[in-house]
Image (cartoon, rainbow, N blue to C red):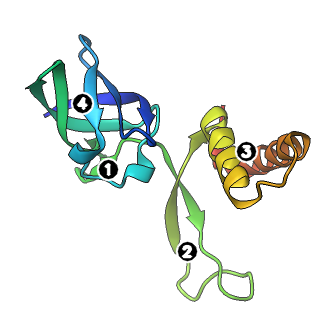
């Protein structure tokens, strides 16, 4: 099993490339070889995969999120994750004291790309200026909450 990072992925065309952690030639990635949801694949994502010889070079198969061992010896996804306290219906702590869930921490560029895609898909009538203003506020809010890092 090899480990690497997705360096680019085109969801429309269904393919991209992985840079192996150990160096060497980039490995071709096709959507049919994913063991994770296609929507989760983006540049910078750490993945584990099998390497095969394809018709045009190296090809990844059985692609999944990279795992590392935590301090307790439990497998953890290698992406940074931050605990987020759950809230009950009234906005206060939930009935289960100190209940926490995990969320992805994104770089500001990746977060901005995702926000842009969501805004364009859900409100295509927004102007470019409106999108820029909304993104700036969302990035600022994300930084305050620890969801976005630089």
Tell us which disc is closer to us: 4 or 2. 4
Residue 30 x, y percent position in the rendering: 27, 37
Name the quadrant of the C terminus.
Answer: top right
Tell us which disc is closer to us: 3 or 4. 4
Residue at x 45%, y 31% (from the top left corner)? 44
Compare residues 135 and 142 and report the one nearer the observer. Answer: 135
Tell us which disc is closer to us: 1 or 2. 1
Residue 93 x, y percent position in the rendering: 66, 80
Which residue is disc 1 drawn over? 76
- Count neighbours of disc 2 (C-alpha within 10 A) and say few if under 14, some if 14 to 19, many if 20 or more: few
- Count neighbours of disc 3 (C-alpha within 10 A) and say few if under 14, some if 14 to 19, many if 20 or more: some
Is mark 1 in CB contact (under 8 Å) with mark 2?
A: no
Q: Is mark 1 on a helix, strand or loop?
A: strand
Q: In this picture, is 12 found above or below 145? A: above
Task: Give the mark, 1 or 2, whose residue is nearer the N terminus.
Answer: 1
Task: Give the mark, 4 or 2, whose residue is nearer the N terminus.
Answer: 4
**What is the spatial separation of the Cα atoms under label 1 and label 3, in whole angstroms?**
23 Å
Task: Give the mark, 3 or 2, whose residue is nearer the N terminus.
Answer: 2
Q: Is mark 4 on a helix, strand or loop?
A: strand
Which residue is disc 3 drawn over? 143
Task: Give the mark, 3 or 4, whose residue is nearer the N terminus.
Answer: 4
Tell us which disc is closer to us: 3 or 2. 3
Q: In this picture, is 121 found above or below 111? A: below
Q: Is mark 2 on a helix, strand or loop?
A: loop
Which residue is disc 4 drawn over? 3
Compare residues 106 and 82 and report the one nearer the observer. Answer: 106
The image's mark for residue 98 is 2
């Amino acid at each position: 099993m090899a480990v690497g990072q997705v360096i680019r992925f085109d969801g429309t065309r269904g393919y991209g490339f992985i840079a192996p952690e150990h160096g060497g030639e980039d490995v071709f990635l096709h959507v049919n070889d994913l063991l994770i949801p296609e929507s989760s694949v983006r540049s910078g994502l750490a993945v584990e995969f099998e390497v095969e010889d394809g018709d045009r070079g190296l090809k990844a198969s059985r692609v999944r999120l990279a795992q590392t061992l935590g301090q307790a010896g439990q497998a953890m996804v290698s992406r940074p994750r931050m605990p987020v306290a759950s809230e009950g219906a009234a906005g206060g702590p939930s009935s289960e004291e100190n209940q926490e869930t995990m969320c992805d921490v994104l770089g500001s560029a990746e977060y901005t790309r995702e926000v842009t895609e969501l805004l364009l898909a859900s409100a295509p009538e927004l102007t470019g200026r409106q999108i820029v203003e909304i993104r700036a506020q969302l990035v600022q809010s994300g930084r305050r909450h620890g969801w976005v890092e630089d």
